[in-house]
Image (tube, rainbow, N blue to C red):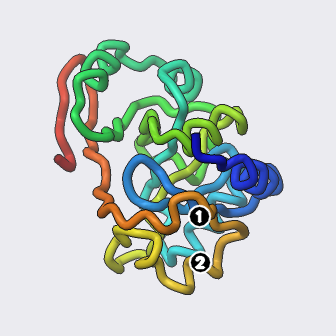
C-alpha cells in the first residue's frame, strides 16, 4: 500500500477552506475543489480562464453518492457502468445539493464514480463530491502527465498532491455519456 496519508490530510484542509487542489484521478490530473462551494468553483473557472457556462464534472466515491446529488437517476445506468471498460462520466438530469455555478443551464451535472485509490479515499474522507477538471488553461492541450502541467496551473492551486507526480503513464480523458430512459448517447467515446 502506497502511503498517501499526508496528501489526504493536506487536501482535506484545503478543500474544507474553499481552496483548490491539483490531484491524480482515474484519468488525467485534475484541478479540484468542494463541489458544494460556489466560491471555490469560481476560483477554478478563473484559474482555467474558462467561461462559467462550460460545465465541469464532479467525482464521487460510489453509486450512493450519485443518488444523493441527482433528483431521480435511472438506476439501470449502474449496470451500464459496471460493464464499461474505461472510466465513464455520465451526464445526469436534475442535479441537487451542488454549487449553482457547477450545474449546467439545463439542470444537469456530469458525474464520474472514481475508482483510483487516492481519489476514492479522498472523496470518502471529505464526504462530499469533488470537482474534477483537466489541469490546463481553457483551450490548451490537456496534460497527459504531471510533468506536462503548466507552471501557471501548479502555482494557481493551494496544494499539489505528491502521490503519482512521477507516474509517466499516459492518461486519457474519460468517456462521456448522457443517459436518458435507458438509452445511452455517447458524447465522447
Side (left or right) of 99 relative to 79: right
Q: Quadrant of residue 110?
A: top left
Where is residue 87 shown, x and y percent of the image? 32, 40
Quick check: 9 above or below 163?
above
- Identify which residue is drawn at 77% across, 58% down: 14
Q: Nearer the viewer, residue 110 or 166?
A: 166
In this figure, which residue is indicated by the disc labeled 2? 154
Say whether marks 1 and 2 touch (CB < 8 Å): yes
Q: Quadrant of residue 41?
A: bottom right
Secondary structure beneath label 2 = helix
Where is residue 71 shown, x and y percent of the image? 51, 22
* Label of residue 22 in the image: 1
- Identify which residue is drawn at 28% across, 57% down: 172
Side (left or right) of 123 relative to 187: right
Can residue 60 be seen here? yes
Where is residue 151 shown, x and y percent of the image? 55, 86
Amino acid at each position: 500500500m502506497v502511503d498517501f496519508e499526508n496528501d489526504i490530510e493536506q487536501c482535506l484542509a484545503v478543500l474544507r477552506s474553499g481552496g483548490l487542489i491539483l490531484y491524480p484521478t482515474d484519468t488525467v490530473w485534475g484541478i479540484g475543489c468542494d463541489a458544494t462551494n460556489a466560491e471555490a468553483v469560481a476560483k477554478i473557472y478563473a484559474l482555467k480562464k474558462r467561461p462559467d457556462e462550460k460545465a465541469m464534472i464532479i467525482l464521487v466515491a460510489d453509486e450512493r453518492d450519485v443518488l444523493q446529488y441527482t433528483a431521480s437517476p435511472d438506476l439501470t445506468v449502474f449496470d451500464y457502468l459496471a460493464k464499461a471498460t474505461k472510466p465513464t462520466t455520465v451526464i445526469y438530469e436534475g442535479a441537487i445539493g451542488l454549487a449553482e455555478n457547477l450545474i449546467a443551464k439545463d439542470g444537469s451535472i456530469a458525474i464520474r464514480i472514481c475508482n483510483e485509490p487516492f481519489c476514492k479515499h479522498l472523496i470518502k474522507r471529505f464526504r462530499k463530491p469533488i470537482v474534477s477538471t483537466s489541469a490546463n488553461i481553457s483551450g490548451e492541450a490537456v496534460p497527459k502527465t504531471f510533468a506536462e502541467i503548466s507552471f501557471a496551473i501548479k502555482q494557481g492551486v493551494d496544494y499539489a498532491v505528491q502521490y503519482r507526480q512521477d507516474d509517466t503513464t499516459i492518461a486519457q480523458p474519460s468517456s462521456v455519456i448522457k443517459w436518458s430512459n435507458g438509452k445511452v448517447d455517447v458524447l465522447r467515446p
